[in-house]
């Protein structure tokens, strides 16, 4: 049973928006129990773990809070799956959060991979989406980042330049820049070799940041891909053929699963980026991988106590990849 708590300050204009959307999202959860609590000061916000008004707690947990988020009585801003901002989560985001809480054996996504529930679709404002999409298309078409001229062209109509927008995209973890300002990653793509090699039908061969990223490329491009990877520790080869437009994927071995892990940011495999609460490239790194079976994934996890995570079956892993990356190039604005 779902226990839901809406935390709001007095007269919050977004409180009724949250309640209306939540009512729609709860259509599939008739047994859920909902209470509303008015928070009047910072001490109360800290005690109840309110991260701005309004906040939704699902079974005592805020599914939309970034790791390390501070408690607050200020107005809270949410970003929906189209990249737009608002004062409450979208109905789609609420449904996903409720489904994951109601089905604990279902897919669990490391916070950093999905930007703590904020999604990977960049906002339109300031040319972020235009430049981000130009970067993604360049990787998809050439296997490399776009040129400075291409980035400047994408940013020009917004009165800015490509370098400025790249810095903003980096600060929000839509992509990563190296110390020289060059693009090192644009989720799902990596500019450097990784264990996950993705051959795009009628396109280049690229590297993905992790297994979930690899599984989302077909949905993002509407093009079939063939993923070649290897099981950590054993090196056993794994191949996944993902058809375009949601067709049935072929997994070899047929018992293949995906382990989605996240390292404690205090023990991150790279120097954590202080610009955002949790950077996927810092804390997830090599911990979201394909394994030949659930048994081998569990054995690897047992040997790596510094990593927390879960084993996803094939349908769950594909769903996550499609959910995160599917809308990135189809959204306009």
Image: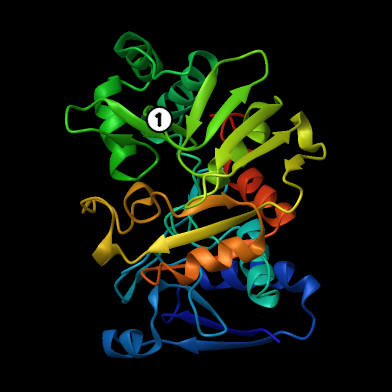
Query: Quick one: 330 or 220, which is closer to the camera?
Result: 220
Is residue 234 toward the left or the right of residue 215 in the image?
left
Is residue 206 toward the left or the right of residue 33 in the image?
left
Residue with the mark numbered 1: 193
Q: Residue furthest top?
A: 149
- Taking the spot 65% from the left edge, 75% from the top edge, the residue there is 104
Q: Identify the coloring.
A: rainbow
- Taking the spot 68% from the left edge, 72% from the top edge, the residue there is 105
Q: Is 182 rendered above or below residue 125? A: above
Q: Residues within 10 Å of mark 1 (few under 14, many from 20)?
A: few
Residue 148, image x and y in percent? 30, 13
Q: Is 162 rendered above or below residue 22? A: above
Residue 60, image x and y in percent? 51, 85
Is residue 193 toward the left or the right of residue 249 in the image?
left
Residue 313, image x and y in percent? 70, 58
Residue 328, image x and y in percent? 56, 35
The image quadrant that residue 263 belongs to is bottom left
User: Is residue 80 shown to the viewer in this render?
Assistant: no
- Number of dots carrying numbers: 1
Looking at the rendered image, the quarter that the N terminus falls into is bottom right
Helix, strand or loop at mark 1: loop
User: Is residue 32 shown to the viewer in this render?
Assistant: yes
Is residue 89 toward the left or the right of residue 135 in the image?
right
The image quadrant that residue 297 belongs to is bottom right
Query: Quick one: 190 or 257, which is closer to the camera?
Result: 257
Q: Is 326 rendered above or below residue 14? A: above
Query: Quick one: 131 or 54, which is closer to the camera?
Result: 131
């Amino acid at each position: 049973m779902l226990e839901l708590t809406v935390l709001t300050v007095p007269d919050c204009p977004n409180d009724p928006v949250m309640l209306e959307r939540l009512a729609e999202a709860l259509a599939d959860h008739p047994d859920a129990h909902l209470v509303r609590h008015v928070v009047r000061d910072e001490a109360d916000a800290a005690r109840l773990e309110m991260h701005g008004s309004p906040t939704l707690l699902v079974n005592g947990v805020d599914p939309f809070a970034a790791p390390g988020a501070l408690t607050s009585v200020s107005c809270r801003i949410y970003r929906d799956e189209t990249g737009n901002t608002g004062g409450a989560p979208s109905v789609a985001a609420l449904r996903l959060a409720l489904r994951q809480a109601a089905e604990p054996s279902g897919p669990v996504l490391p916070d950093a991979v999905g930007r703590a529930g904020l999604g990977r679709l960049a906002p339109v404002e300031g040319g972020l989406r235009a430049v981000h999409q130009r970067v993604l298309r360049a990787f998809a078409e050439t296997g490399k980042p776009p040129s400075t001229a291409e980035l400047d062209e994408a940013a020009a109509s917004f009165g800015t330049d490509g370098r400025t927008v790249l810095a903003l995209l980096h600060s929000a973890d839509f992509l990563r820049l190296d110390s020289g300002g060059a693009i090192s990653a644009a989720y799902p793509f990596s500019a450097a070799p990784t264990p996950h090699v993705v051959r795009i039908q009628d396109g280049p061969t690229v590297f993905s940041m992790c297994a979930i990223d690899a599984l989302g490329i077909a949905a993002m491009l509407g093009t079939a891909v063939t993923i070649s990877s290897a099981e950590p520790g054993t090196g056993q080869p794994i191949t996944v053929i993902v058809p375009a437009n949601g067709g049935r994927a072929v997994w070899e071995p047929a018992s293949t699963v995906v382990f989605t892990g996240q390292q404690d940011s205090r023990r991150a495999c790279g120097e954590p980026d202080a610009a955002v609460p949790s950077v996927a490239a810092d804390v997830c790194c090599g911990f979201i991988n394909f394994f030949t079976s659930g048994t081998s994934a569990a054995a690897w996890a047992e040997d790596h106590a510094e990593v927390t995570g879960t084993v996803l079956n094939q349908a769950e892993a594909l769903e996550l990849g499609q959910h995160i990356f599917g809308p990135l190039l189809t959204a306009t604005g």
